[in-house]
Image (cartoon, rainbow, N blue to C red):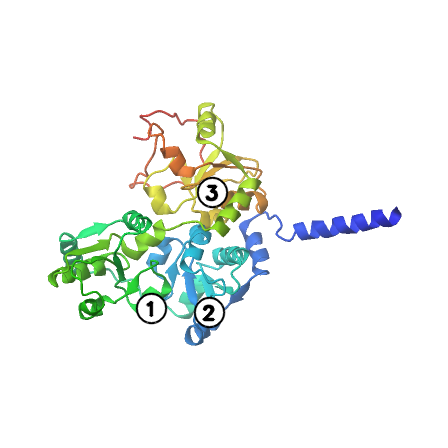
């Protein structure tokens, strides 16, 4: 009997050690430092060697705004908050040589760990991130597009038909017949592209198109990075008497922002996360507001999504930045926190991180997210006041009144 008890105690100790491997942490700094012991980091110099000798995928996990302000050449932008939802669609090979970076290294460390959980076997992050890269190899300031070029692009767009990423998804779902052409440069195409597209750089388009697609009635859809090159290219094809040419509004950037489609593996991860947090329905949330409950409402979508409309009194902290900003926003770890995203997936993963790692005790997410909330047109929606900068300090939601006229 004594031997059984000793064995049980030893087994219990092992289980405690194993369960504590992930651990709980008082702040994001501790979380990042613990994560770094479980991943591979490379220096800027190491990455410079990778650039010259290896095939790799370079992913910038910062926000779209940070990426637009400047990024490492050849990097594609997948914000950390969307990474698990997009990675398997863009880079299905789990043995891909993937290098991640962010501003200072923190978000990339957490993202690297997450990809390991999705069974990606060769993922590294750049120590010190974008900041270390700039210090080692300063980059020129971003150049603005000349006004004359902007006017030229606008004139071209006025002569053609643009479709949205949602329109393209509908065509794909219906298995419509069309030719999808990426008119960016080969290195841009290699860094990431719409599934099923072919690459014909704009500079070669007129010379290649008649060889590859001689049918002038073919349904042709063009895209580039933001829409400008595709608009000019579409105009040229119309001069060559191609009759059904369209371009994707917003280009690759708009598509990649809209294409966060969970795969079965990600769905399983989200389902597991939902077991560790509390989901509430939209009606539950509205009841809490009506009863004057005190809580903090956080929108973990990207800033651009938040800018299109949000649940009244929600503050914006994109999921990719949540662990780094939450302690400055909500210091009390017993405070009721309600998270939401577009459909519920990002909020579930964000909530799990707050509960399991940063010791927040009362975290909930809204089932169905923003789409579930707005499915009832009577629910009010707010939009940011552009003249004023958003105050990230948490405010009580007690003053919110749910009515069809609120949030106008």
Q: Distance of mark 3 from mark 2, alpha carbons? A: 33 Å
N-term mark: 3 or 2: 2
Q: Where 245 sits versus 331, above or below?
A: below
| Residue at image location 71% in from the left, 50% down from the top | 15
The disc at residue 80 is none
Q: Residues within 10 Å of mark 1 (few under 14, many from 20)?
A: few
* Image position of 187 (left or right of 37): left
Label 1 with label 3: CB-CB less than 8 Å: no
N-term mark: 1 or 2: 2
Q: Residues within 10 Å of mark 2 (few under 14, many from 20)?
A: many
Q: Secondary structure at mark 1?
A: helix
Question: Mark 3 highlights which residue?
Answer: 347
Residue 393 visible in the shown view: no
| Residue at image location 41% in from the left, 26% down from the top | 399
Q: Secondary structure at mark 2?
A: helix
Image quadrant holding the C terminus, namely top left
Q: Residue 74, how many percent across, how many down?
A: 36, 66
Q: Residues within 10 Å of mark 3 (few under 14, many from 20)?
A: many
The disc at residue 187 is 1
Q: Nearer the viewer, residue 107 or 371?
A: 371
* Image position of 179 (left or right of 374): left
Question: Mark 2 highlights which residue?
Answer: 44
């Amino acid at each position: 009997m004594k031997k059984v008890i000793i064995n049980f105690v030893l087994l219990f100790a092992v289980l405690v050690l194993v369960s504590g491997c992930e651990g709980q942490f008082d702040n994001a700094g501790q979380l990042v430092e613990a994560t770094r012991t479980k991943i591979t980091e490379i220096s800027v110099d190491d990455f410079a060697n990778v650039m010259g000798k290896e095939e790799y995928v370079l992913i910038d996990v910062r926000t779209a705004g940070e990426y637009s302000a400047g990024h490492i050449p050849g990097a594609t932008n997948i914000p950390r908050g969307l990474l698990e939802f997009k990675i398997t669609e863009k880079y299905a090979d789990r043995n891909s040589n993937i290098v991640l970076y962010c501003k200072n290294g923190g978000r990339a460390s957490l993202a690297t760990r997450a990809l390991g959980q999705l069974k990606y076997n060769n993922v590294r992050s750049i120590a010190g991130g974008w900041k270390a890269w700039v210090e080692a190899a300063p980059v020129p300031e971003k150049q603005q597009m000349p006004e004359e070029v902007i006017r030229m692009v606008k004139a071209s767009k006025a002569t053609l038909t643009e479709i949205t990423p949602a329109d393209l998804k509908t065509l794909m779902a219906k298995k419509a017949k069309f030719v999808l052409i990426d008119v960016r440069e080969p290195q841009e195409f290699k860094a990431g592209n719409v599934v099923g597209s072919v690459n014909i750089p704009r500079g070669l388009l007129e010379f290649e198109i008649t060889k590859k697609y001689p049918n002038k009635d073919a349904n042709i859809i063009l895209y580039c990075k933001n829409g400008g090159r595709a608009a000019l290219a579409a105009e040229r094809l119309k001069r060559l008497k191609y009759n059904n040419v369209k371009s994707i509004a917003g280009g690759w950037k708009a598509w990649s922002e809209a294409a966060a489609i969970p795969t079965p593996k990600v769905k399983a991860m989200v389902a597991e996360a939902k077991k560790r947090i509390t989901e509430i329905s939209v009606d539950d949330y509205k009841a809490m507001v009506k009863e004057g409950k005190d809580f903090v409402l956080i929108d973990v979508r990207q800033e651009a999504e938040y800018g299109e409309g949000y649940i009244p009194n929600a503050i914006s902290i994109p999921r990719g930045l949540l662990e780094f900003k939450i302690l400055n926003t909500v210091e009390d770890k017993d405070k009721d926190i309600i998270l939401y995203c577009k459909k519920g997936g990002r909020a579930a993963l964000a909530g799990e991180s707050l509960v399991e790692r940063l010791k927040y005790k009362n975290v909930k997410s809204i089932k169905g997210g923003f789409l579930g909330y707005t499915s009832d047109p009577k629910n009010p929606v707010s939009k940011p006041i552009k003249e004023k900068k958003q105050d990230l300090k948490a405010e009580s939601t007690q003053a919110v009144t749910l009515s069809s006229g609120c949030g106008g």
